[in-house]
Amino acid sequence: MKLIYFIWGNMKQRCYNKNNKNYKWYGAKGVRVCDSWQTFANFHKWAVNNGYKKGLHLDKDIKGNGKLYSPESCCFVTPKKNIQYNKKINYDIAQEIRNTYMLGCITQWELAKAYKMSQVNVSYIINNKQWV
């Protein structure tokens, strides 16, 4: 329970406390916490029922648009997956192809694996806007 409270508190601090060192990346960019998660009990219930385990990160970008912490837009992921998904290039790829056939975000590694290509080739295609 302590760790879930810590995650909840940090989420709110990033979004609403202008003195928080990460506010510039969250609250200042319009990231908010949904109304139901303003109450810890609601967040705790969601976390327990949605895969919370010690060591996982709360992510709002994979399922959502990165602007709202909510039950619909968040999930728990490993630190490695969180870093991969939050790389700007991976976010851009996901946004570009999301409306075609893939849901959520995808990493360069996952794209390379899906298309049986090297990550170097995937990077080249993306960086030169030759994906289609």
Image (cartoon, helix red, strand yellow):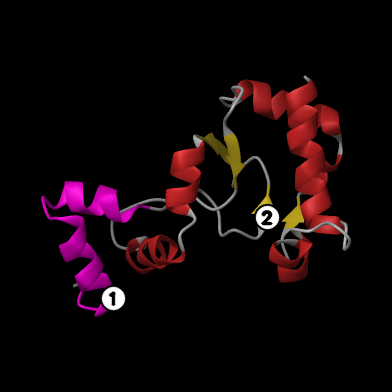
Residue at the limit of the structure toward the front, as seen here: 21
Compared with 58, 28 (above or below) is below
Compared with 112, 47 (above or below) is above
Q: Mark 1: which amino acid?
A: Asn
Q: Position of residue 66 (x, y in %)?
A: 59, 58
Residue at the limit of the structure toward the bottom, as seen here: 128
116 and 95: which one is in front? 116
Q: Where is residue 129 in the image (x, y as percent from the top left)?
A: 26, 79
Q: Mark 2 points at which residue?
A: 68
State yes or no: residue 108 in magenta. yes
Question: Residue at horizontal 37%, vertical 60%?
Answer: 98
Q: Which numbered dot is residue 127? A: 1
Question: Residue at horizontal 66%, vertical 21%?
Answer: 48
Left-right relation of 31 to 110: right
Q: What range of the chain is rendered magenta?
A: 106-131
Label 2 SS:
strand
Q: Mark 2: which amino acid?
A: Leu
Left-right relation of 28 to 83: right
Label 1 SS:
helix
Residue at the limit of the structure toward the left, as seen here: 116
Q: How crowded is mark 1: few (under 14 residues within 10 Å), some or many (20 or more)?
A: few
Q: Which of marks 2 and 1 is nearer the N terminus?
A: 2
State yes or no: residue 80 in magenta. no
**Quadrant placement of the N terminus:** top right
* Residue 131 visible at all: no
